[in-house]
């Protein structure tokens, strides 16, 4: 609750961390929606009668390959198409990685500046221990908020990045299967 008070008060580090958290949530929801929309497993597509789902990356690859006539063109086109599909799944993940790295540092920066302000106020006035402990608590809340944002961003980056690598591997297996037939 105190973090919301800091954000509404316009404390710069809290505002930046809140924006980073918001961007993280938006990217995660969009990437999960993209993964759900184009969900699929490789095994049904190895059979001759695979279902036609235009959003499915395996269907898109096999359709693109069927349009190429010569073997060198097929292989080159397939590699290009796999890179395009993987790029679609990989979109935005670098932002999650960056937020996951920077958010804890921003939280620590907010804590240090908050403690500096607290000790400056303590030196210039005769603040009691209650005011000092409140100032320290408010400064430490910035680190907690930064760590929460960073942990969420890094965890979701790992989950989504693993999905991208899984799809890339499945597309390579499918390409090998199609080249063998």
Image (cartoon, grey):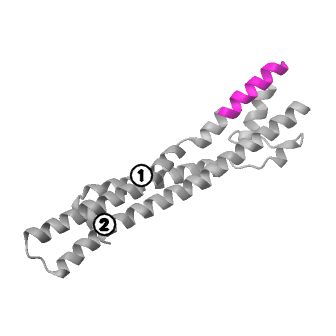
- Report crowding for label 1: few under 14, some 14 to 19, many 20 or more residues within 10 A (C-alpha): some
Q: Position of residue 105 (x, y in %)?
A: 38, 55
Q: Is 96 left, or right, of 20 in this rendering? A: right
Q: Report helix, strand or loop for mark 2.
A: helix
Q: Residue at x 26, y 72 (%)?
A: 136
Residue hosting label 2: 4
Query: Residue 80 colored magenta?
Result: yes
Q: Quadrant of residue 133?
A: bottom left
Q: In the image, what residue occupies the spot 65% across and 46% down?
A: 164
In the image, residue 54 lies at what x, y percent?
70, 39
| Drawn side of residue 94 relative to residue 142, left or right | right
Tag count in the figure?
Answer: 2
Above or below residue 153? Residue 144 is below
Q: Which residue is mark 1?
A: 102
Q: Is residue 16 left or right of residue 29?
A: left
* Magenta span main SS: helix
Q: Is residue 7 visible?
A: no
């Amino acid at each position: 609750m105190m973090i919301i008070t800091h954000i509404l008060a316009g404390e710069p580090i809290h505002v930046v961390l809140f924006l980073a958290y918001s961007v993280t949530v938006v990217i995660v929801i969009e990437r999960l929606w993209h993964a759900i929309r184009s969900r699929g497993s490789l095994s049904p597509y190895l059979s001759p009668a695979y279902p036609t789902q235009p959003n499915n990356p395996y269907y898109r690859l096999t359709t693109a390959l069927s349009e190429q006539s010569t073997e060198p063109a097929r292989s080159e086109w397939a590699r290009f198409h796999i890179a395009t599909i993987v790029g679609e799944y990989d979109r935005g993940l670098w932002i999650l990685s960056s937020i996951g790295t920077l958010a804890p540092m921003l939280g620590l920066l907010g804590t240090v500046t908050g403690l500096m302000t607290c000790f400056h106020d303590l030196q210039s006035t005769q603040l009691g221990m209650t005011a000092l402990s409140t100032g320290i608590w408010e400064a430490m809340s910035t680190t907690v908020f930064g760590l929460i944002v960073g942990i969420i961003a890094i965890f979701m980056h790992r989950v989504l990045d693993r999905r991208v690598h899984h799809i890339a591997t499945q597309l390579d297996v499918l390409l090998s299967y199609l080249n063998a037939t």
